[in-house]
Amino acid sequence: MKRTNPSPSSQERDELERQVESLRREVRQLRLEQDLLKKANELLRKGLGVDLQLLSNREKTLLIDALREHYGLPELLIQLDLARSSYIYRRARAAVGDKYLQVRQSITDIFESNHRCYGYRRLQASLTRQDVKISEKVVQRLMKQQSLVVPKPRKRRYALYLGELSPAPENLINRDFQAAVPNEKWLTDITEFQIPAGKVYLSPIIDCFDGMVVSWTTGTNPDAELVNTMLDAAIETVAETNDRPVVHSDRGGHYRWPGWLSRMSDAKLTRSMSRKACSPDNAACEGFFGRLKNELFYPRNWNNATIEQFVEALDAYIRWYNEKRIKISLGSLSPIEYRVSLGLAA
């Protein structure tokens, strides 16, 4: 005798339909969550593990608009925990347009043309010089939105101490790096750059008055010629004046050799030296080296650069530093602009 399966009762059919419908809702919910995460990754550059609830209302509005073709507005609002009124407000703001569009472009241009080293204060000062009035907080926000990040400081110091070759003069600067006039206090030191093509050494003289680089030399050896040539060039800048600056250095052998001593004596310049192994005694010069490396050296790839190309880039940076790089402490002017404003330079 052939058996037949009993047909399900209406109650069982209703239960099965409820289960199917529940599964459909769960599948749709999972698909919605997945689509939101994908769009957040595509449009907002967020990771696939991002918490959608932590997005800004502007970002949530962008996601909703991107998926309105496939999902209803109510379920999208619920999923992103966004009020309908907030969504309408954000859409209206977007329709008006970005009121900072031109400012964004100006900020990016200034940032890129200044070795990508200007923080929000100097960017705001640069905009003020262009008659653009905007607060520092807005500049900070726009920098973040444009992904304009200033390289973080890195510490690395070159030193050459050959012992007490001759008596060390007194530390006349004594960590007072302020000067009332140009050519009152000069600082000097040597720093090293190591690139694949070889080592390059920089020897500058920094004026405490405004941080201007009075003279500088570069070479592949940290020898007497490097520092003596730099000193000769610096002496030429005061040859026709009565300026006789104090020249402060560390206790490196470069500043205790006969050539250096005779040049200092002939030009009637006064020597000053830091204490042994005490870099804070020449902190202002170290600060210049730090800025130079953070703004020029560390952010760039020098793998394919020759020694000559690196030296050219170094020279160009120092000229930019003197002529164009603004300092907040100088009223948002470069050292040369500052001297011109005071009538100290043409």
Image (cartoon, grey):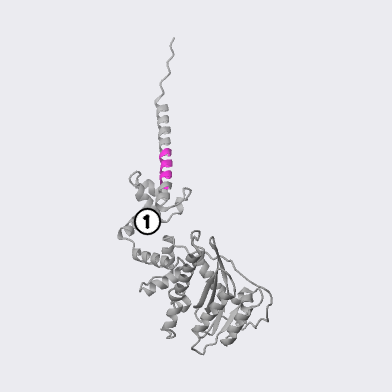
Query: Residue 25 appears at what percent x and percent y?
Result: 41, 38
Name which residue type carries label 1.
Ser
Magenta range: 26-36
Residue at 45% across / 68% down in the picture?
120
Split into 4 quadrants, where in the image is the N terminus?
top left
Tell me which corner region of the image, top left, top right, bottom left or bottom right, holds residue 272: bottom right
Q: Which residue is mark 1?
A: 86
Query: Residue 259 appears at what percent x and percent y?
Result: 60, 80
Task: From the viewer's perspective, tell me whether residue 291 is left or right of residue 107.
Answer: right
In the image as oriented, which residue stretches furthest toward the bottom? 242
Residue at 41% across / 53% down in the picture?
44
Task: From the viewer's perspective, tell me whether residue 311 is left or right of residue 279.
Answer: left
Residue at 44% across / 60% down in the picture?
147
Residue 83 shows in this picture:
no
Which of 33 and 326 lies nearest the eye of the viewer? 326
In the image as oriented, which residue stretches furthest toward the left? 96
Query: Residue 311 appears at what percent x and percent y?
Result: 49, 68
Residue 43 shows in this picture:
yes
Circle 1 Cα neighbour tier, 10 Å, few/some/many (<14 / 14–19 / ≥20): some
Q: Secondary structure at mark 1?
A: helix
Residue at 42% across / 27% down in the picture?
12
In the image as oriented, which residue stretches furthest toward the top? 1
Which of 213 and 178 lies nearest the eye of the viewer? 213
- Examine the residues drawn in magenta and state their main secondary structure: helix
Task: From the viewer's perspective, tell me whether residue 185 is left or right of residue 12.
Answer: right
Relative to 28, does residue 273 appear above or below in the rendering?
A: below
Which of 47 and 308 lies nearest the eye of the viewer? 308
Split into 4 quadrants, where in the image is the C terminus?
bottom left
* Membership of 30 in magenta stretch: yes
* Membership of 306 in magenta stretch: no
